[in-house]
Amino acid sequence: MASERADELYKALIEKGYPKELCSEIAYKYLNTDYTATRMLGYLYRMTEIPKVEVIVDEMIAILSDRDQLIKKKESEHAQATISEVYRNGL
């Protein structure tokens, strides 16, 4: 089930004139979380001219890359907190 933001992203992409298949892939397959859809919506709303398809796909990849880095950072922080807890309290 898609988030409301993914639906909003799909509609925004359609309104910009992008092909339905591309809009569906972006909104429902790749940027289907509130975080990623909101990032792309922010990008689209800031643009005064309609970006080329290549630019939209490039932005999508950048958003996914940022999300992956954030996930890795959170995992690392959790692992470090667990190690610190073991050092403090033992096994």
Image (cartoon, helix red, strand yellow):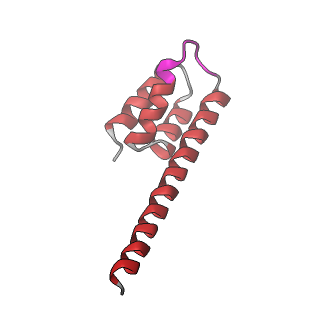
In this figure, what is the number of numbered marks? 0
Q: Quadrant of residue 10?
A: top left
Q: Vertically, is 6 above or below 18?
A: below
Which residue is more in the foreground, 84 or 61? 84
Magenta segment: does it hold 50?
Answer: yes
Q: How far across and down, in percent of the image, does residue 41 sit?
A: 45, 28
Residue at point 32%, 36% (across, down): 4
Q: Which quarter shows the C terminus? A: bottom left
Q: Quadrant of residue 18?
A: top right
Which residue is more in the foreground, 42 or 50? 42
Image: magenta residue range: 44-51
Q: Residue furthest top?
A: 48
Q: Residue furthest front?
A: 88
Residue at point 42%, 26% (across, down): 11
Residue at point 45%, 69% (across, down): 79
Q: How far across and down, in percent of the image, does residue 42 sit?
A: 46, 26
Which residue is more in the foreground, 72 or 51? 72
Q: Vertically, is 76 above or below 37?
A: below
Which residue is more in the foreground, 84 or 51? 84
Q: How far across and down, in percent of the image, does residue 40 sit?
A: 49, 32
Residue at point 56%, 34% (across, down): 22
Name the chief secondary structure element in magenta: loop
Q: Residue furthest bottom?
A: 91
Q: Quadrant of residue 52?
A: top right
